[in-house]
Image (cartoon, helix red, strand yellow):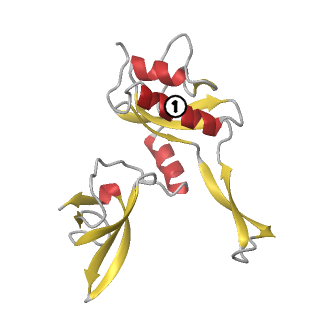
Amino acid sequence: MANESFEREWYALQTYSGYENKVKRDLEQRALSMGMEDYIFRVLVPEETKVDESKIDKNTGKPKEYQEQIFPGYVLVEMVMTDQSWYIVRNTQNVTGFVGSQGAGSKPAPLLPEEMAGILRMMNLSIRVSDLEVNIGDTVRIIEGAFANMTGNVSEIDYEKHKLKVDIEMFGRETSAELDFDQVEEF
């Protein structure tokens, strides 16, 4: 298994335009069915929320919001690059290749961490992933940010965005803080 990395890194996949969400679903399903959840982690179709001022939502009276792809024809995958994970990803239907691959069976170069950090921030997703295992009502200690060293109870969990809401008591009142998984630890 030459050229294998055991580090979790982000890679960009080229797809047929219009098939990005299908590739995401198919790749997530293949990772599950082939037992590769420890090698293929997050699959993203980079999108951002746009507002169309010319269309008004009849229910809210506000301009309609919609999702627009940031990089049409591309899907991002967070994975550990092994021969097997590389094979599964590149042979997923509608994937045309990896960005940064020189061809002839060579493994692709991962995206730079600062590139990925910007994309994830734009999508309002967590940059780092934690193996945090908590449930609503559990007590956690905040280890990073404005509320560092405080404890609170988990009130909401968003597994897709890797965020949670923690209720903290401050000055005799309960305050809710939205935090990334990696900003807290189990208490």
Left or right of residue 87, residue 56 in this image: right
- Mark 1 surroundings within 10 Å by alpha-carbon count, few (fewer than 14), some (14 through 19), many (20 or more): many
The answer to whether residue 33 is above or below residue 143 is above
Q: Residue at x 47, y 18 (%)?
A: 87
Name the residue nearer the viewer: 151 or 153: 153
Left or right of residue 173, residue 90 in this image: right
Left or right of residue 137, residue 28 in this image: right
The amino acid pointed to by label 1 is Leu
Which quarter of the rendered picture does the C terminus lie within?
bottom left
The answer to whether residue 85 is above or below residue 136 is above
Q: Residue at x 31, y 64 (%)?
A: 136
Furthest toward the top, the residue is 104
Percent from the top left, x then y, of residue 138?
Answer: 24, 64
Quarter of the image for residue 147 reads bottom left
The answer to whether residue 101 is above or below residue 17 is above
Percent from the top left, x then y, of residue 14?
Answer: 62, 30
Percent from the top left, x then y, of residue 7?
Answer: 33, 32
Q: Which residue is mark 1?
A: 27
Q: Residue at x 49, y 44 (%)?
A: 116
Furthest toward the bottom, the residue is 172
The answer to whether residue 15 is above or below residue 86 is below
Furthest toward the left, the residue is 187
Q: Residue at x 25, y 72 (%)?
A: 152
| SS class, disc 1 | helix
